[in-house]
Amino acid sequence: AALAAAAFGWTVSLGPLSDDFVLRKWAVAGEWIPPDWNFVRPLPLGVWQLLFGLGGSWAAIHLVNVLLHVVNSALVAHIGDSWLGPRAGVSAGIIFALFPTSTEAVGWSAGVFDLASTAFALGAVAVWLSRSGTAGTVRTLLLLCAGGLLSKETGLAIPLLLLLVVALSPTRPSRLQIVQVLIAGLLSVAYLAIRASTAPVVAGHLQNLPGDRRQWKDLLVRPFSGLTVPMRTDEGVDTAVYVGGLLLLTLFAIAAIRVSRASSTGHGSNRAAAVLCLGVGWVTLSTLPLLLSFYVAPNLEGSRYLYLPSAGFALAASVAFDRWGGSRLNVVATVALAGLLALFASRLNEERHLWVAAANTR
């Protein structure tokens, strides 16, 4: 959490960019659901109205983004810890906190939609993993799902992520926990049905399904290509891209070894394999609501779409720090992670200069 704040604290002084001016106009006027906007995202706009109404500046709006990123990093670490222990949890949280593609979501005030929907998604998973089968938990889970839906359309992925967690849970979920997920799914289906019936653009988006194998392949592969190369390549592929790829490959190779070692012990529950599958499935399911509109340019424009998927990617990479495999693997994994984080920090510094320069051209 501290690293997340340190990595993006500079964004507080950026000020408004691009769509921020229109969003501020709507927020100040209390237009949480603007009639000429194709999206329904009232919750973040309501927060903006409150902050601007209290005399807050753009610095306060940016601070909300940074705080949301801090919370999200802590939640990723908590989820990793609950599955594989503190070492894996810390590594997942740090990778997520410093992931270079998060700059657009955190640095751009309008990225609050992605940050908020991700916070609700991670919160829902964390609540479900708490194993509290009470009526209060059901209400909390539904509120988190509703919050995600009212923050951005990617909130539709929350029930899908919960179903994935249920399927991979190392312990058998209770009947009430399964009912919780089903209710969350019904809430999302109802929301989608209402939106499709009242907004032609939503109905048109739902018809935007891949029409052939190539489009399906692109839909499944693009998120992973963006996450494995979380750097700008619009001016060519430099050495850092290859180094980063090698370090990530090292972490995932160690993760595969951990899974193999855990399987060979004969334990009925292989948590390492479960988290690896969780991470891979998370990346895929969290981008499904976008369908063919998902795209990240070589200059990282659109990289905010990778914010929620990067949480799953960080969890998958954290399997490299599972307890199975011995001390040598621990050393190699630690060195690889240190190198990767140093590279991420360098790229984040480059992104800082680019975003500050863009803000200065207003």
Image (cartoon, helix red, strand yellow):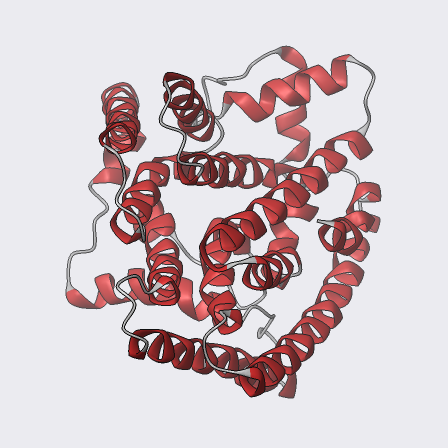
Q: Position of residue 127 (x, y in %)?
A: 45, 34
Question: Foreground: 342 or 219?
Answer: 342
User: Which residue in the rendered view is the most extreme toward the front?
Assistant: 266
* Horizontal and vertical percent position of residue 84: 48, 60
Residue positioned 59% across, 85% down in the render: 332
Quarter of image, res 352: bottom right
- Which is more toward the observer, 362 or 32? 32
The residue drawn where x is 44% and y is 82% is: 253
Residue at the (45%, 31%) spot, across then down: 148
- Image position, residue 13 (x, y; %): 84, 43
**Is residue 149 in sight in this rendering?**
yes
Q: Quick one: quadrant of the C terminus? A: top right
Q: Decide: is 253 above or below 6.
A: below
**Would you place residue 348 above or below residue 247 in this image?**
above
Percent x, y of residue 273: 34, 67
Q: Is residue 116 above or below residue 170?
A: above
All told, the count of numbered labels is: 0
Drawn side of residue 19 relative to residue 42, left or right: right
Q: Quadrant of residue 220?
A: bottom left
Instruction: Left or right? Give the position of 145 relative to 98.
Output: left
- Residue 237 in view of the camera: no
The residue sitting at 31% across, 37% down in the picture is 159
Left or right? Give the position of 304 relative to 212.
Answer: right
Of residues 151 and 237, which is closer to you in this image? 151
Say whether residue 15 is left or right of residue 314: right
